[in-house]
């Protein structure tokens, strides 16, 4: 059953507000009439947040006392946890090394926000998750009730553990804890290096390209986040488009709309040598996700129901 929408305008505390999703979310919240306090670690991004209509706050999500002080000052009705540190992300041979700072934000940073929520009396906390957390076996499309991965690939153990930590801790600790398991982000500023790699033929199809991906445009992810701020029962929600697709289908299409040659194909053993076990698993074994729960309970519909039209809009 869909939870009733909160009709009142709210004070919303958004962390990670200048990220790929936050750049859509903050203006959306302001347009909806909510009062937004938005955090950044960079003084250079304060003007950007103020121009979007938010009250900017410079705070490091790993500084517990600073986080608590900022939240107490804002007195939010809702806290939104979008903290990541992915600006310099490159190859994924060693996932845990690439995501080390983000993993800290997903563990210690989450604890800090939950402690601040408790101190401030903030009932609702909406946090960022990821649908790559599902087991890479069983049916091709996963719902929120399906099991998460029990034995992650060694190079990604700490990263998967951090995602699972958010999944488990936010609904258990916050009075109204919601985790949004986003699909793979795309859109301007979110995954531009992917298009560059496709044009340079540096993103191959590995094995049979049988890994099934669920995508979400960052604007659609922000719309789902706004919906979760305003309504929805506590728990986890897949935030993905309507068309999970195997790599062998979506990657050649992305190359086509990007005006590139078709992607090269590599056997799995070569992929392991060049890119590592995690990338091969994503290309050959990962499962997609269903968005039915988010549609039903959050009253949300993605503008780009399929990555097909979303890719065209993004690349142009």
Image (spheres, helix red, strand yellow):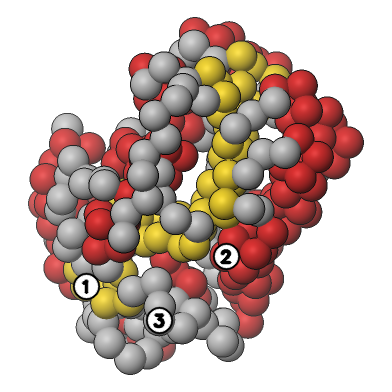
Identified at 40% across, 78% down, the residue is 145
Residue receiving disc 1: 246
Q: Mark 2, mark 1: which one is toward the viewer?
A: 2
Residue 109 relative to residue 204: left or right: right
Q: Secondary structure at mark 1?
A: strand
Relative to 227, residue 127 above or below: below
Q: Position of residue 288 (x, y in %)?
A: 30, 72
Disc with the residue nearer the chain's start (3 vs 1): 3
Residue 242 relative to residue 53: left or right: left
Residue 84 relative to residue 198: left or right: right
Quarter of the figure with residue 21? top left
Residue receiving disc 2: 167
Q: Secondary structure at mark 2?
A: helix
Q: Position of residue 118 (x, y in %)?
A: 76, 45
Q: Nearer the viewer, residue 260 or 237?
A: 237
Question: What is the CA distance from the residue labelled 2 to the residue labelled 1?
Answer: 25 Å
Per the rendering, the mark at residue 146 is 3
């Amino acid at each position: 059953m869909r939870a009733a929408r909160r009709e009142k305008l709210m004070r919303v505390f958004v962390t990670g507000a200048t990220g790929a999703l936050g750049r859509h979310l903050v203006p959306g919240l302001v347009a909806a009439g909510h009062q937004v306090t938005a955090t950044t670690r960079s003084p250079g991004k304060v003007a950007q947040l103020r121009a979007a209509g938010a009250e900017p706050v410079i705070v490091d999500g790993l500084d517990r006392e600073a986080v608590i002080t900022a939240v107490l000052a804002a007195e939010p009705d809702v806290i939104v946890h979008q903290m990541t540190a992915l600006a310099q992300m490159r190859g994924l041979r060693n996932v845990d090394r690439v995501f080390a700072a983000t993993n800290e934000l997903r563990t210690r940073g989450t604890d800090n926000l939950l402690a601040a929520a408790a101190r401030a009396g903030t009932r609702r906390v909406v946090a960022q998750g990821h649908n790559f957390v599902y087991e890479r076996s069983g049916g091709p499309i996963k719902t929120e009730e399906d099991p998460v991965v029990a034995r992650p690939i060694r190079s990604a153990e700490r990263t998967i553990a951090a995602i699972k930590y958010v999944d488990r801790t936010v609904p258990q600790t916050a009075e109204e804890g919601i985790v949004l398991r986003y699909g793979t982000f795309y859109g301007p500023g979110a995954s531009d290096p992917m298009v560059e790699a496709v044009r340079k033929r540096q993103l191959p199809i590995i094995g049979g390209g049988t890994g099934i991906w669920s995508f979400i445009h960052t604007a659609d992810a922000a719309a789902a986040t706004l919906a979760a701020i305003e309504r929805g029962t506590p728990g986890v929600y897949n935030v993905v488009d309507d068309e999970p697709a195997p790599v062998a289908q979506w990657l050649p299409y992305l190359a086509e709309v990007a005006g590139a040659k078709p992607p090269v194909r590599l056997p799995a053993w070569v992929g392991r040598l060049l890119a590592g076990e995690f990338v091969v698993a994503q290309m050959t074994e990962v499962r997609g996700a269903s968005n039915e729960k988010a549609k039903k309970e959050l009253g949300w519909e993605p503008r780009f129901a399929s990555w097909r039209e979303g890719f065209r809009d993004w690349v142009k």
